[in-house]
Every structure is written in structure tokens, then in C-alpha cells.
Image (tube, grey):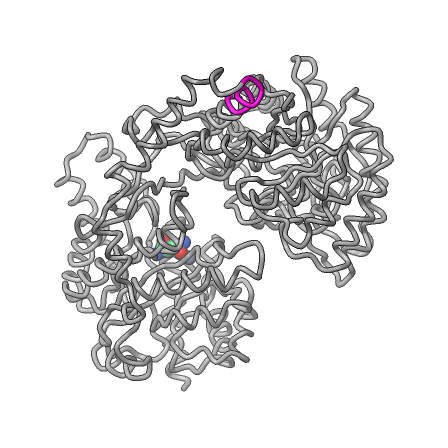
């Protein structure tokens, strides 16, 4: 018998019930009991949706983040939250979200800083980073997990608890002093032993222990840590399913095969070619769980194609074979059935979490009963797969041939930077320390109302346009009175920097409820890139032209770059990402040229998400950076020498990718640096970045208004590393989340700082 299981289920609920319950509780509109009840109910619903599985994950639910849950289970809480007297869940939220003001009820003399957040492997999910130092100790608190196990058992669920393994837990954390994280392993393992015993005494057979760092490159001492850890956990009375996902094991494969665990889960979507080797190396008593349904995208599986490969594997493995999605379904929306507006042909190509589990059920039915048993399902799947492959909405021969014609000339500016810079300076005539902003100005309630009314059909296009023109005019007026040097139109017409372009490109579809958790209560609804990408008509030109008509100052054209559009979408899986990226690049390139035609002298192409597309393994970085940078160049570098190309990135952690950034050859890059006190610019001391740079001097994530002195101080630090002639003065990022009454004083100080710096030279 083949066993089916799941690694994790989306926790927000199909209607984002958890988000709304959390936010109501945080606003004081509901009680902790209300919130707990919503949680219990969601878990019950999630388990019901998975009832057909042989083993159902428990412990994957979280009120905020599964890594923070693990920190609580292991008793690893930052010292600054010690001395807390209230409810455990409140304490949990204090770490998750921080608390800016001291409150007597919490016994705090100061506020509490939120735990740092970072990306979960190569996903867009963010976890709360565990904090360690040489004094860190651990103490088991399994109550939270045990309570969920008991709830599930009382509902008749076939429970398989999910925990994060000790080595990955350490790897995900950050040491606050210079001590060695791995030295903590010996303190951590006894707590894991106790945790496993506690789970075993609930009468369970298996536990899923996630060790996703196994798909990354490991230093020898970390490889050794795996041996040590799993030797020490081997004596516990529960079977361990050592679980890896998001990639191949490569050089770690023999080590994994040799660990004393009862079973191993492999991501058989990304690492199908490792299955044979793993079968050969695994001792014959071990279970092999294969993640055969992609847990990272929204495409229907080609079930017939999968079976062609899987049937012989199943024959070989017999009862040892388990099947599952490749990873937790946390990264996909809950239920496709809720979508009412998707075109039916396109919809037939998709599978969300529930549909993926249904695919798994069909695969099991076939493996056990033969293909005849599931014929109607297999036929329907075949029809959808064929329709997707052949559809003219997916395949646009003109786009394919344009991509085929890309040559090295296409991404090449006519002249080198120095010459371009001279020509641009003559036209633009900007002062030293030129001031600008990153694109968006505050998204006010008026803007949102106009957009919603337009989308709901309550106002017509003319009324909507005129509302946007009013907003643009306001932005221009404000920038005139602030005295900025290079203007933006403010992006009032954009709800989101990727969605705005996706909606106007052919090859994109949009779900209504396709939400995926990003962090805490925050969800994103990525647009779905399903087909060859083309641009039927200009997307931004009319807004920029209007904005430019209101001022003599240069107005930046404002675009989102191809890599960012790619990285923030659900992307088709039937061709390499690099090909898709180049298609987007060609479409945006057309927009660049239309903006130029319309007389726009400066064009900014944002690549906010370039860095986050880096593969998990460093050995694959060059390949990614190669096509990512080429895509940017294709999109940007068709511009004339006289056109100044800017790009913007929401980070400045360039140490390891600075050469790639330089190779983009943008005339100006603006980056996020204010919070690091310009320390992140250290890389520019050794690497001579050749073009112009605007290091952010205003932390737009904070309500604080930077003073003129503070900004001058930051710019002076920047000037120690980059010649002042090549520096710009600008905020860290766009201003859409701020209020006008914060933006005006902050930019006033920024402009004043630039003037002071100029007169001091
Ligand atoms: N131009 C965009 C804005 O200002 C950039 C946003 C971003 O980098 N995330 O809003
Ligand atoms: Zn940004």
C-alpha cells in the first residue's frame, strides 16, 4: 500500500479568516478566546480538507510563524522579553511584532523590539529569526504542539506532527555575539529528545522533521552536525521522517541516505533525477516519501506523465513508498473552486492546495488499482494538460521568434557610461547631490476610493482618469514647492508595482482569492503568468506625459523591471524562467522606447526583487545572475545615450553580487541604506562601482522624520566611499505607505541637506 501525506496546509483559511481574526485581536476588537476559537476552527477545517490522506500534518498551523512556534517549543526566547507575566499568546505576539511603547500591563519599562524577519529559503514567506548567543539555553515547552495533537486526535485525524529539525533550526538563527552556533547543538539535542518522547507518548507512530538546509551547501562541521543530531535522536520511540524540500540534495545525498531515521522525504519535483540514487543508497527498511506534486506553484500536475515515471518506481519500492506534495502547501492558495471570474479554459490549467491533494489521491488510486480505476480523472487531466500545451493564449509565435532573435547587441548601450554621462549632464543640467524620490507618493484614501469605484464600475474611465490627474498634479505641486531636482508622477494609478503591469500585458491572469501568506497576517496575491508575454499597447506613457506637461523639471518614467515582475508572479513551468524573463524584458523594452519617443529624459526601471531570486545554492548564482542581468539589459539598454536609465533596489546587500549589479550598466542606481548607517556601502570601497548612486537617506519603513543633520551625516559617510559628483540624494524606497504630513517634512530636510552639502564643497 502506498501512503499519502501532506507536509503542511495553508493556515490563513480560504477567506483569509486568520488574517482578519489576528488583526481584530491586535486592534483590541476581539478577545484572545475569540482568536483561539478561530484558530481551532481553521485547524479543524484544514484537517477535514485533508481527510483523504493517510497521514495529516499537525503543528503546521501557526498564529504567526512556524519558526517562532519552534522557538517557543524549545524555550528559546530573546532575553528582552523576559519577565513577562501575561498570556503566552500575547508574549508570542510581542516577539513577532514588537511593541513600540512601554505598557504597564506588560510590565515593560521600554518597548520591545520585534524579532528580525527574513525569507524562508527561496520563498516569499518570512520567518522570525531565532536569536542565539553563547549563553542560550533551551527548555522544552511542548504544550502548544501536544494540545494541537490532542485536538486532531479527538477529531479522528491520522496525526503526523511536523517540527523543524535541530540542525535547520540552528542554521536559520542568528548569533548575537561572535560565538559558534553549532556549539549549541549539544544543549539543543536533549530538548529534542524530550520533545520526541512527548510526541511518542501521545500514541503516534511518525513525526515529520523538516531539515530543508539539506538542499543547500553545507560546511563540513554542519554535515557532521547532522550525523551527531540524528544519532542522538535515533533512540527515541517515534519514527522520524527526515524531510527535505525546495531542491536537490546533490553532495548531501549519501549522508542523508545513511542517517539513522525511519524514512526520508525528497522533493521529487526538483530532484526527480536523484530518486534512483537515493533508492540505491537507502537501507531496505527505510520509507521513501516522494514529493511528486509541486507545492510551489498553481499548475495542475500532468498526472499521466507523472505516472509514466512513478509506476515503475512504485513497483520497486512497494510498501516503502509514500507520496506527498513536494513541500508544504503554505506557498499556494487554498481552493480553486472559490474562483468565479477566471476564464474557464485558463482555470482548467490550475490546481490550488485542495486540488493538489485531490491529484495525490488519484495518483494513489492508480498506483494501487491501475489506471482503469481512475479513468475519468486521468482523461480530464489529460484534456487540461493538452489544452494548456496547445492553447494559442499560451503560445504566441511572434513573441517566441522575438526571443529567438535576441543577440548580444540588444542589451548593449551605444556608448560607455562616461560618454553617456556627459551627454546626459548637458541635457539635464542637474546640480551635484541631485535630489529625487523613488516613485510613489502616499496612496491616500481618495486614491483607493477612486480605484475601487472604477474597478466596481461605479465611475467611468474619464472620471477615474481625472481623479488620477488631480493626484499627479498634487504630487507635481508638492515637488515644486519642496524644490526637488528630478520629479516623479507619484504612481497613484498603481495598486501594486507588478500587478499594474501584469494587468496590461498579454499572458497574465488574476485570481480573486489566490492569497499566499507573506508574513504574520500579511498575504500577497501573486499574478499568474501563464503564457507568452506581449504588450498590446503603451502602459505608462499617458500618465508620465501628463505629469511632464505640468513642470519644467525632468519627470522620471517609472517602470518595473523584468526580473521583479518574474519573481513576484506565479510563473509558468513549461519553459525555463530565463526564457519567460526575456519575454517580459522585450515587452518592457518597448515601453522604454515609447517613453523616449514621448520625450521622457529619465527612465527608472525598478528591480526590487532581483536579489531574492538568487538560487539556494551559491553554485547556481552565476547562472541566475547571468540571465537576470541580461534581461535587465535587454529591457533598458535600447535607450539612446541621452536617456538616463535609473534602477532601484530595495536593499544594498551587494557584497556578493556587486559585479552583476555593475554589469546592469544603469546610469544611476538607488538603494536602501539609511538603516545600516551607510555601512552597507563598504563594498564600494573595494569594488569601484563606475556609475552614479543614490544611497537612501530616509527610512521609509519608519514614521520617524530624519533631520537635516542626520541626512548630511549619512551623505558624508557615503561621500567617503563614492565621489560626490556621482552621488544622488533620495529616500530608501517609495513613499506609498507613508502620510503626506510625514513625507513633506522629511523631504524638506532632504532638500535642505543637499543644498548644505553643495554649498560646503
Ligand atoms: N517605484 C516603486 C515605488 O516607489 C518602487 C517600490 C519598491 O522598490 N518596492 O513605490
Ligand atoms: Zn524599494
In the rendered image, which quarter contains the N terminus? Answer: top right
The image quarter in which residue 36 lies: top right
Question: What is the residue that sits farthest to the bottom in this orientation?
Answer: 761
Vertical order, 597 against 526 (above or below): below
Q: Nearer the viewer, residue 6 or 595?
A: 6
Q: Nearer the viewer, residue 242 or 499?
A: 242
Q: Nearer the viewer, residue 50 or 604?
A: 50
Which residue is painted at 49% across and 76% down in the image?
A: 718
Q: For the image shown, how many numbered marks are present on the structure? A: 0
In the shown orientation, is residue 585 left or right of residue 675?
A: left
Where residue 234 appears, as percent x and y from the top left, is: 83, 37
Vertical order, 258 against 405 (above or below): above
In the shown orientation, is residue 495 left or right of residue 23?
A: left
The image quarter in which residue 503 lies: top left
Where residue 598 appears, as percent x and y from the top left, is: 14, 63
Where residue 459 appears, as percent x and y from the top left, is: 17, 33
> Does the image show residue 340?
yes
Residue span colored magenta: 362-369
In the rendered image, which quarter contains the C terminus? Answer: bottom left
Where residue 33 appears, as percent x and y from the top left, is: 62, 21
Which residue is painted at 41% across and 84% down in the image?
A: 760
Which corner quadrant of the figure contains ligand 2? bottom left
The answer to whether residue 368 is magenta is yes
Which residue is painted at 28% across and 63% down in the image?
A: 406
The answer to whether residue 680 is magenta is no
Vertical order, 751 against 159 (above or below): below
In the shown orientation, is residue 486 left or right of residue 279?
A: left
> Does the image show residue 28?
no
Main SS type for the magenta part? helix
Vertical order, 564 against 369 (above or below): below
Amino acid at each position: 500500500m502506498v501512503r499519502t501525506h501532506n507536509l503542511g496546509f495553508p493556515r490563513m483559511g480560504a477567506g483569509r479568516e486568520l488574517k482578519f481574526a489576528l488583526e481584530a485581536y491586535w486592534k483590541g476588537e476581539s478577545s484572545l478566546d475569540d482568536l483561539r476559537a478561530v484558530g481551532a476552527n481553521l485547524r479543524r477545517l484544514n484537517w477535514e480538507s485533508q481527510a483523504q490522506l493517510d497521514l495529516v500534518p499537525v503543528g503546521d498551523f501557526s498564529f504567526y510563524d512556524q519558526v517562532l512556534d519552534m522557538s517557543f517549543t524549545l524555550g528559546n526566547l530573546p532575553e528582552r522579553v523576559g519577565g513577562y507575566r501575561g498570556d503566552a499568546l500575547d508574549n508570542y505576539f510581542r516577539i513577532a511584532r514588537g511593541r513600540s511603547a512601554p505598557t504597564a500591563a506588560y510590565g515593560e519599562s521600554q518597548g520591545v523590539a520585534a524579532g528580525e524577519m527574513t525569507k524562508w529559503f527561496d520563498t516569499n514567506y518570512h520567518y522570525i529569526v531565532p536569536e542565539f548567543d553563547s549563553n542560550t539555553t533551551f527548555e522544552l515547552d511542548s504544550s502548544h504542539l501536544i494540545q494541537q495533537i490532542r485536538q486532531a486526535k479527538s477529531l479522528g485525524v491520522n496525526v503526523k506532527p511536523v517540527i523543524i529539525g535541530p540542525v535547520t533550526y540552528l542554521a536559520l538563527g542568528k548569533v548575537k555575539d561572535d560565538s559558534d552556533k553549532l556549539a549549541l547543538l549539544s544543549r539543543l539535542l536533549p530538548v529534542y529528545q524530550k520533545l520526541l518522547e512527548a510526541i511518542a507518548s501521545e500514541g503516534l507512530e511518525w513525526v515529520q522533521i523538516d531539515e530543508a538546509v539539506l538542499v543547500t551547501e553545507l560546511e563540513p562541521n554542519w554535515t557532521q552536525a547532522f550525523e551527531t543530531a540524528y544519532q542522538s535522536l535515533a533512540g527515541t520511540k517515534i519514527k522520524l521522517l527526515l524531510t527535505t524540500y525546495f531542491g536537490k540534495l546533490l553532495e548531501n545525498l549519501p549522508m542523508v541516505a545513511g542517517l539513522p531515521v525511519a524514512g526520508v522525504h525528497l522533493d521529487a519535483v526538483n530532484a526527480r533525477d536523484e530518486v534512483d540514487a537515493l533508492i540505491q543508497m537507502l537501507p531496505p527498511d527505510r520509507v521513501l516519501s516522494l514529493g511528486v506534486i509541486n507545492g510551489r506553484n498553481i499548475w495542475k500536475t500532468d498526472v499521466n506523465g507523472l505516472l509514466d515515471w512513478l509506476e515503475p518506481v512504485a513497483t520497486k519500492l512497494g510498501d516503502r513508498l509514500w507520496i506527498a506534495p513536494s513541500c508544504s502547501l503554505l506557498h499556494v492558495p487554498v481552493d480553486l473552486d472559490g474562483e468565479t471570474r477566471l476564464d474557464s479554459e485558463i482555470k482548467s490549467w490550475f490546481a490550488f492546495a485542495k486540488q493538489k491533494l485531490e491529484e495525490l489521491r488519484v495518483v494513489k488510486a492508480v498506483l494501487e488499482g491501475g489506471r482503469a480505476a481512475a479513468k475519468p480523472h486521468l482523461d480530464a487531466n489529460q484534456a487540461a494538460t493538452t489544452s494548456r500545451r496547445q492553447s494559442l493564449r499560451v503560445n504566441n509565435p511572434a513573441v517566441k521568434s522575438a526571443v529567438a532573435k535576441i543577440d548580444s547587441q540588444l542589451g548593449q548601450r551605444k556608448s560607455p557610461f562616461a560618454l553617456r554621462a556627459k551627454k546626459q549632464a548637458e541635457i539635464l543640467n542637474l546640480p551635484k547631490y541631485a535630489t529625487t524620490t523613488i516613485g510613489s507618493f502616499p496612496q491616500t484614501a481618495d486614491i483607493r476610493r477612486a480605484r475601487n469605484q472604477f474597478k466596481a464600475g461605479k465611475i467611468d474611465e474619464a472620471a477615474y482618469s481625472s481623479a488620477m490627474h488631480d493626484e499627479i498634479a498634487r504630487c507635481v505641486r508638492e515637488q515644486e514647492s519642496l524644490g526637488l531636482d528630478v520629479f516623479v508622477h507619484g504612481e497613484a494609478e498603481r495598486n501594486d508595482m507588478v500587478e499594474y503591469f501584469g494587468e496590461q500585458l498579454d499572458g497574465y491572469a488574476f485570481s480573486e482569492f489566490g492569497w499566499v501568506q507573506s508574513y504574520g497576517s500579511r498575504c500577497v496575491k501573486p499574478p499568474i503568468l501563464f503564457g507568452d508575454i506581449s504588450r498590446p499597447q503603451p502602459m505608462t506613457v499617458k500618465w508620465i506625459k501628463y505629469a511632464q506637461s505640468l513642470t519644467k523639471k525632468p519627470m522620471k518614467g517609472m517602470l518595473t523591471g523584468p526580473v521583479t515582475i518574474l519573481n513576484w508572479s506565479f510563473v509558468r513551468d513549461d519553459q525555463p524562467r530565463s526564457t519567460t524573463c526575456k519575454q517580459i524584458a522585450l515587452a518592457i523594452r518597448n515601453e522604454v522606447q515609447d517613453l523616449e519617443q514621448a520625450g521622457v529624459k529619465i527612465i527608472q526601471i525598478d528591480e526590487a526583487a532581483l536579489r531574492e531570486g538568487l538560487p539556494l545554492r551559491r553554485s547556481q548564482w552565476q547562472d541566475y545572475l547571468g540571465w537576470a542581468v541580461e534581461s535587465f539589459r535587454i529591457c533598458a539598454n535600447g535607450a539612446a545615450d541621452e536617456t538616463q536609465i535609473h534602477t532601484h533596489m530595495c536593499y544594498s546587500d551587494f557584497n556578493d553580487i556587486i559585479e552583476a549589479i555593475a554589469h546592469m550598466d544603469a546610469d544611476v542606481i538607488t538603494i536602501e541604506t539609511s538603516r545600516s548607517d551607510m555601512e552597507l556601502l563598504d563594498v564600494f570601497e573595494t569594488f569601484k562601482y563606475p556609475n552614479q548612486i543614490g544611497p537612501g537617506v530616509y527610512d521609509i519603513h519608519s514614521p520617524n522624520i530624519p533631520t537635516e543633520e542626520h541626512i548630511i551625516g549619512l551623505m558624508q559617510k557615503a561621500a567617503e566611499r563614492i565621489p560626490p559628483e556621482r552621488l544622488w540624494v533620495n529616500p530608501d524606497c517609495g513613499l506609498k505607505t507613508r502620510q503626506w504630513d510625514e513625507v513633506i517634512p522629511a523631504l524638506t530636510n532632504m532638500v535642505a541637506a543637499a543644498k548644505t552639502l553643495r554649498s560646503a564643497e
